[in-house]
Each structure stands twice: as structure tokens, then as C-alpha cells.
Image (cartoon, grey):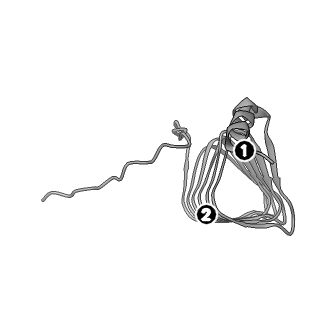
Amino acid sequence: MFNAKNNSATRSAIPDSGAVNIIGSGTSIEGDIVSGGDIRIDGSLKGTIQTRGKLVVGPTGTVEGEITCRDADISGTVVGKVTVNELLALKATSKVTGDIQTGKLAIEPGADFSGSCGMGGVVKEMKHDEQQPATTTEKTA
């Protein structure tokens, strides 16, 4: 039905910022998601999410893995490292376990957060194919 040439041409013609991706309630995915657009999760995801857009984890949504995005609204459950370039909003029904690095943080009363949080400064925006270099710390006497 589709050959590889037509499929890749179609993907490149889709603007990054206009894409809206939805994982509906009752849907379970294992794997990594890379997107240029917004993502809404009302189902379950085990894996990493990288998007240049906004991530919304709905009240029934669960994410187990690393998240990197521009903005995020979390109402559901997240277990893993969360890196948000601009604004991270933890809604009253959210349950987040893991480390957070964000530009700005908004937490509603009732939100459950366990981990460490770094705020402000410049959060480096990762490209989809970029890997973070390993760092080591040496202590001298």
C-alpha cells in the first residue's frame, strides 16, 4: 500500500509544530516516542518521550521512563526523569516520582512529588539524535 519512498516523503511534508499525537485511555505502548508536535497521554507508556512541543499526561495517563519536552501538564502518574525547557505544571491529581529539571514549575495543592527538582537557568534543548556525554567527577586529596 505504501512504499518506503512515499512514506518518507509524506513524513517530511508534515510540519513539526502542527502534529498532535494522542495515546487514548486503554492503550498501552512499550517503546520510545520522538515527535516535533504536542503529545497527550491518557493511556500507558513504558519508554522515553522526546518532543519539541507540549506533553499532557491526563488523569488516567501513566508514563514510566524519561521525558524531555518544551512544556508539560501532568495530571496522571509519571515515574522517571522529567526535563522541561519552559513550564512544568503538576496538577492536583498528579503523582510524579523522579528527578525534575525545568525552567518554571507550578504545583497545585494535592499534587504528589517525590524526587529532586532543579529550576531556572537554561535547560539545554536536546535534539532527537543527540546523546548526552557521560560525566565523571574526580576527587583529589
Callout 1: few (<14), some (14-19), or many (20+) C-alpha neighbours within 10 Å? few
Given residues 2 and 131, the one toward you in this image is 2
78 sits to left or right of 76: left
Q: Please report whichever mark, 1 or 2, sits nearer to the chain's N-terminal start.
A: 1
Residue occupying the far right of the picture: 25
Given residues 32 and 135, the one toward you in this image is 32
Q: Is residue 124 above or below residue 47?
A: above
88 sits to left or right of 92: left
Callout 2: few (<14), some (14-19), or many (20+) C-alpha neighbours within 10 Å? some
Q: Residue 3 bears which disc, if any?
A: 1
Read off the residue under disc 2.
Answer: 65
Residue 117 position within the rendered picture, expressed as x and y whole percent measured from the top left = 56, 55
Given residues 3 and 131, the one toward you in this image is 3
Q: Say which residue appears at 61% left-offset and 58% top-offset.
A: 48
Q: Say which residue appears at 38% left-offset and 48% top-offset.
A: 133
Look at the numbered discs 1 and 2 and tell me whether their residues touch, using CB distance below 8 Å. Answer: no
The quadrant in which residue 136 appears is bottom left
138 sits to left or right of 54: left
Amino acid type assigned to the residue bearing label 1 in the image: Asn
Residue 101 position within the rendered picture, expressed as x and y whole percent measured from the top left = 56, 50
Q: Is residue 67 above or below residue 93?
A: above
For mark 2, give the secondary structure: loop
Q: Residue 141 bears which disc, if any?
A: none
Residue occupying the far left of the picture: 141
For mark 1, give the secondary structure: loop
